[in-house]
Image: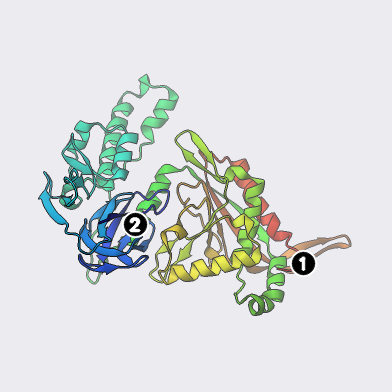
Amino acid sequence: MAQIELIMPKMGESVAEATIIKWLKKEGDQIAVDETVLEIATDKVDTEIPSTVSGTLVKRLYLEGDIILVGKAFAVISTDINVLIEIEEEKTTETSKAYTLIDTKGPPPDNEINLHIEDVSLGIFLSPLVRNIAREEQITTAELESITGTGAKGRITKNDILAYISGKDKVTKDAAVERLPELQPAKIIQAISGTSHSKPSISLNAGDEVIEMDRMRRLIADHMIMSKHTSAHVTSFVEADLTNVVLWRERVKKEFEKREGEKLTFTPIFIEALTKAIKDFPMINISLDGTKIIKRKNINIGMATALASGNLIVPVIKNADTLNLIGLTKQVNDLAARARSGKLSPDDIQGGTYTISNLGSFGNVMGTPIINQPQVAILAVGVIKKKPAVIETESGDFIGIRHFMYLSHSYDHRVVDGSLGGQFVRRVADYLEQWDVKREY
């Protein structure tokens, strides 16, 4: 007899938990290796989780809608259909559930809380994200007990603890302002630059339609606010002459598609120039962990991709600097197609070290992109437009029609100063402007 626990796999460096959307197998069902058992959702992507073994599903350890921590068991499979496993369901002090698996070969193991990490001293459960926020902001046990949770079963959500911190910061700031004469200049600045903001009052008028955000849009909103709260955003702009790139692509695109079976867009061209610039300025390919700078060995380029729903997802091209233009094109087209059809795997959206967003595909001239945490920089490229320009030659200057594009580079000023941020985006533009119109693929 063999009982195998199915474990929730790692789904990205910043993904600690997942929510069960739907069970695809019932208890008692036969399951083959690599057959899908359930569908889950994370703050990055929706995906399916397959079985790592074949056998009989004898117990589902969670309900639909429950949250599973990465690395925890979510089901038990028996590889012997004659094995009898008795399941005892118990109630805990909260309304969360614990399960005991009784093995016919030995005593039952200790009960295991499945919904969340539970803080025994508090008698409440906290998600990993809320725990980290509480730890970083030095929220005491007494303070946590005073927070009213608005989540399911009274759970303290991220918004609950951030609202508490904002209120606490405002009280601290107001108290500090009252005693400004006692403070040093640096403390005065800190006192008057609090981040607490009250929510605007929204009134509804006749004919207004109220639309609830879908789950992905809520996660995107949280991620964007978190990024702005985390990083000191600065954006530098460069205008690049892409005439050589445009003329070269126009010359080779039909032959490229016929030979490689892939459409040649501008995106892989931009990514090639981007990876070259990252090699020239490796300190743009970093992450910040407190006061520790993590310099990334691999160059993994995330490409922001708009979905039909209007939402956004960022699949990642791993080791982009090792691919030629053909390889980049195949990766770009494959990831974009699977993103729009909902076929991305968790691995497809993890491990990014730098992100590019093509605003030009929507006809936008430029933008100020928000950094994709935990990265420290992001590049946005605008629409390519024809403009009159002064062309300098040995025999004199003249006015000609050229193709121009704006590049917008947002970076985290905590670790990337204006000199590095500005030189980097200028270098990307240089590689594009120096494109060899006679080159092969």
Split into 4 quadrants, where in the image is the C terminus?
bottom right
In the drawing, does residue 411 fall left or right of residue 54? right
At x 12% / y 46%, what residue is drawn? 92
CB-based contact (under 8 Å), mark 1 and mark 2: no
Write down the residue under mark 2.
Answer: 42
Is there any visible trace of residue 314 in the rendered image?
Answer: no
Place of residue 101 in the rendered image (x, y in percent of width and height, measured from the top left)? 18, 51
167 or 378: nearer the viewer: 378
Q: Quadrant of the N terminus?
A: bottom left
Q: Which residue occupies the extreme right position in the image? A: 395
Q: CA distance from mark 1 to mark 2?
A: 54 Å
The image quarter in which residue 229 lies: top left
Q: Is residue 222 left or right of residue 58?
A: right
> For the residue marked with disc 2, what is the amino acid?
Thr
Q: Amino acid at mark 1?
A: Ile
Task: Give residue 338's position: percent from left, percent from top.
Answer: 46, 69
